[in-house]
Image: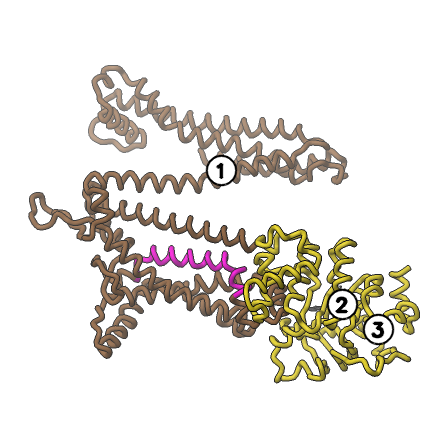
Chain colours: A yellow, B brown
């Protein structure tokens, strides 16, 4: 897929969409461009993430969902060739400002990666790592408490409770994915970015994670990338549809799935939904 | 004449390989996909059978030919010539016959000896031709037989893989046997040494003065063979070297892998690796001419007396030489840690330092340990720098400012000169070598255990 034969879109096709006036916006992004070397992956993305809601990012593979997600905690800084421009604000503060400490930012914005990446440490240490470096727990008992509840919420505890000392790498793919979710929530960030957190999970584990997301919404703001329309429909209140690096459409999840305005959104949803 | 064998065997093997391959294709009328094994395996199968038995036969034959002919020769000698000869006289006679057969005549050989030399010559030629004929016969027979095995459902791949299995076992056995051979020969000489000097004195003695009387009845020195000072010196120098090499090497590796820009890395890494390519003699010069005087001057300023030959100078320079071993291994190991792990740590709000210490170094530890081990063995085995910068006098000290000596240096000095291998001075070299070998072996085993345990925990 190349972006050459697609004419740039000047404004988002969000006709008639507006957030309720009283809704606090957690993350506001304007005109975000990202390129990897010569290849531009995102074109002028304007997107608002309301606090204590779940926003789903959907779209065909390679359209820039992960790229956008990684802008929000400046994870693209880690990639040498990645260039990000535009404006992204967290609680009204530009996170790409020179005065921002990336470490602090990432402690506030947790992330679950597309590919599970447990540390080569024990299951316990994997989950305890974030709380440890941030000094969240005051003593050992509290740390254990955090680890256990995090694992429980991620629906992994029962499977691993007898072998918390085993290496995180010895787990199956789906278990690793849940371990990474537990690891992310143990640090208690304000925002959690989830890149296809259920891609390797069976329906039961998926249901657990979806429940977790719903529960987390009380206290956190969540952005989730998913390839499953049903999942987007189940867990999110707002949905953004990306296509070839453009944010094509944004709106209430229900509206996007029942009554998409853009032709491409319609095609994508019906192609997969039907 | 014997050179025919390798040439003709090579030719036959090529013929066998391509013949087998083509035949496999022909057997299925070109429809390769219907073959069980790919044509390559059929070709290899035939080639293996053509090559290996004949090769083995030749090797065994060449091994046995000499002794067998010797036995036949002795039998063929007229009984009055060989009766009453003991073993070494018989050997003498045989070598006279052999050299006569080669054409060099000493003195006046008897007619019987000349006849025996003629027989010897003739038998050798005969044996040579017999070998050529029989090995070629085996090859050709194998070619004909195995070629007929080729069929659509012939499991050539399994056969070839079996042969490869054996080949690999043979190769690893070779390495093990070599090690065993070294140990055995070292042990035998060491045992001879321990006949002359008690193991207790050698292992726990504090005095190393390996002299022996040059003339019989010379009064001066009986020599003392307490090896502790030598081993202590080795340990001291290796320790100093590692104290320099490990921190500097590891920090350079971390800089190269995590902090440097691509450009800086492309320049710095090769530069650093040049250090490993400098001949150790040059390091020795450097230690003697630059480092030692500098240390001495410094010592004078602060009022310390530093010997011109010191463990510090030798160990320090050796440490510099070893930096690239550690930095290179560690850099590779750290760079090999997947980016996703770094991102995982950053994503939790870990700082770069925390990520390196908590995630990258533990994950890279096996590689880092590999570099450290290599450096330690180099440090223990290094001779030239020590000879030049630390001296050859064994003193019982842990003071890095005094001259010391090391095991390898002592082995060299013991073996220089043309004394026979029958006195404690030369034999001591083997005992030193044996203990050094056992020590490094133990070190390797320990390190292996350590990394394995660590891996179990972290991998
Ligand atoms: N590290 C990288 N280096 C170079 N190009 C990249 C890199 N990461 C992503 N890209 C490119 O950016 C574009 C967007 O990729 P991105 O990972 O954001 O897609 P995605 O929507 O998450 O797809 P998927 O659903 O398959 O995960 C792709 O064309 C991809 O090739
Ligand atoms: Mg993605």
Q: Tag 1, which chain? A: B
Quarter placement of the N terminus of chain A:
bottom right
The reply to whether dot 2 and dot 3 touch (C-beta < 8 Å) is: no
Q: Tag 2, which chain? A: A
Distance in Å between CA atoms under marks 1 and 2: 57 Å
Q: Which residue is drawn at the image coordinates 51% and 63% (left, top)? A: B361
- Looking at the rendered structure, the secondary structure element under dot 3 is loop
- Looking at the rendered structure, the secondary structure element under dot 1 is helix
User: Relative to B168, is B337 above or below?
Assistant: below
Quarter of the rendered image showing ligand 2: bottom right
Distance in Å between CA atoms under marks 1 and 3: 62 Å
Residue B214 among those drawn in magenta = no
- Looking at the rendered structure, the secondary structure element under dot 2 is strand
Q: Position of residue A11 (x, y in %)?
A: 85, 81
Label 2 crowding class (10 Å Cα cut-off): few <14, some 14-19, many 20+?
many
The residue carrying mark 2 is A224
Residue B376 among those drawn in magenta = yes
Left/right of residue A204 with respect to residue B409 in the rendered view: right
Q: Which mark is residue A5?
A: 3
Left/right of residue A8 with respect to residue B412 in the rendered view: right
Asked if marks 1 and 3 fall on the same chain, the answer is: no
| Rendering quarter of residue A73 | bottom right
**Magenta residue span:** B358-385
């Amino acid at each position: 897929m190349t972006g050459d034969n697609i004419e740039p879109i000047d404004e988002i096709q969000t006709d008639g969409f507006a957030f309720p006036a009283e809704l606090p916006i957690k993350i506001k992004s304007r005109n975000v461009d990202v390129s990897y070397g010569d290849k531009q992956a995102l074109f002028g993305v304007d997107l608002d993430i309301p606090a204590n809601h779940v926003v789903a990012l959907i779209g065909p593979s390679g359209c820039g969902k992960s790229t956008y997600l990684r802008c929000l905690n400046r994870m693209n800084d880690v990639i040498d060739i990645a260039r990000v421009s535009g404006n992204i604000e967290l609680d009204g503060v530009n996170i790409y400002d020179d005065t921002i400490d990336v470490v602090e930012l990432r402690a506030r914005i947790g992330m679950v990666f597309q590919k599970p990446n447990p540390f080569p440490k024990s299951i316990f240490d994997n989950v305890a790592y974030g709380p440890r470096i941030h000094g969240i727990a005051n003593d050992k008992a509290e740390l254990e408490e955090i680890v256990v509840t995090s694992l429980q919420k991620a629906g992994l505890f029962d499977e691993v409770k007898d072998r918390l000392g085993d290496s995180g790498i010895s787990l199956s793919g789906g278990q690793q994915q849940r371990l990474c979710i537990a690891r992310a929530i143990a640090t208690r960030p304000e925002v959690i970015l989830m890149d296809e957190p259920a891609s390797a999970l069976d329906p039961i584990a998926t249901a657990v994670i979806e429940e977790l997301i719903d529960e987390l919404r009380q206290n956190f703001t969540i952005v989730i990338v998913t390839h499953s329309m049903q999942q987007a429909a189940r867990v999110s209140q707002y949905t953004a549809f990306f296509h070839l690096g453009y944010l094509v459409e944004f709106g209430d999840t229900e509206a996007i799935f029942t009554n998409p305005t853009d032709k491409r959104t319609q095609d994508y949803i019906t192609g997969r939904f039907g | 004449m014997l050179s025919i064998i390798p040439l003709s065997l090579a030719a036959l093997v090529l013929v066998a390989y391509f013949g087998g391959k083509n035949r496999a294709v022909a057997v299925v009328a070109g429809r390769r996909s219907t073959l069980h094994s790919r044509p390559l395996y059929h070709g290899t199968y035939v080639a293996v059978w053509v090559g290996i038995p004949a090769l083995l036969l030749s090797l065994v034959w060449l091994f046995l030919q000499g002794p067998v002919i010797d036995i036949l020769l002795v039998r063929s000698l007229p009984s009055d010539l060989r009766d009453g000869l003991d073993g070494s006289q018989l050997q003498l006679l045989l070598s006279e016959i052999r050299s006569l057969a080669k054409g060099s005549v000493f003195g006046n050989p008897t007619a019987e000896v000349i006849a025996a030399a003629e027989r010897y010559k003739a038998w050798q030629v005969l044996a040579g031709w017999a070998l050529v004929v029989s090995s070629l016969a085996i090859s050709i027979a194998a070619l004909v037989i195995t070629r007929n095995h080729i069929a659509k459902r012939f499991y050539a791949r399994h056969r070839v893989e079996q042969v490869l299995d054996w080949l690999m076992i043979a190769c690893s056995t070779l390495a093990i046997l070599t090690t065993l051979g070294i140990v055995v020969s070292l042990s035998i000489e060491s045992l001879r040494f321990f006949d002359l000097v008690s193991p207790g004195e050698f292992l726990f003695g504090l005095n190393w003065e390996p002299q022996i009387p040059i003339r019989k009845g010379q009064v001066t020195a009986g020599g003392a063979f307490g090896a502790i000072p030598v081993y202590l010196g080795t340990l001291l120098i290796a320790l100093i070297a590692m104290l320099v090499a490990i921190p500097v090497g590891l920090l350079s590796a971390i800089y190269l892998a995590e902090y440097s820009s691509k450009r800086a890395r492309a320049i710095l890494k090769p530069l650093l690796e040049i250090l490993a390519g400098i001949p150790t003699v040059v390091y020795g010069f450097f230690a003697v001419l630059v480092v030692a005087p500098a240390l001495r001057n410094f010592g004078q300023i602060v009022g310390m007396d530093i010997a011109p030959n010191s463990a510090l100078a030798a160990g320090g320079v050796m440490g510099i030489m070893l930096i690239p071993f550690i930095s290179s291994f560690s850099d590779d190991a750290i760079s090999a840690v997947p980016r996703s792990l770094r991102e995982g740590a950053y994503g939790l709000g870990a700082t770069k330092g925390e990520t390196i210490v908590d995630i990258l170094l533990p994950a890279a530890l096996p590689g880092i340990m590999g570099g450290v081990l290599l450096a330690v063995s180099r440090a223990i085995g290094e001779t030239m720098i020590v000879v030049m910068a630390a001296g050859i006098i064994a003193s019982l000290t842990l003071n890095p400012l005094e001259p010391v000596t090391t095991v390898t240096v002592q082995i060299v000095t013991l073996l220089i000169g043309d004394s026979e291998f029958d006195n404690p001075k030369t034999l001591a070299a083997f005992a030193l070598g044996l203990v050094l070998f056992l020590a490094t072996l133990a070190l390797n085993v320990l390190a292996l255990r350590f990394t394995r345990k660590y891996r179990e925990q972290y991998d």
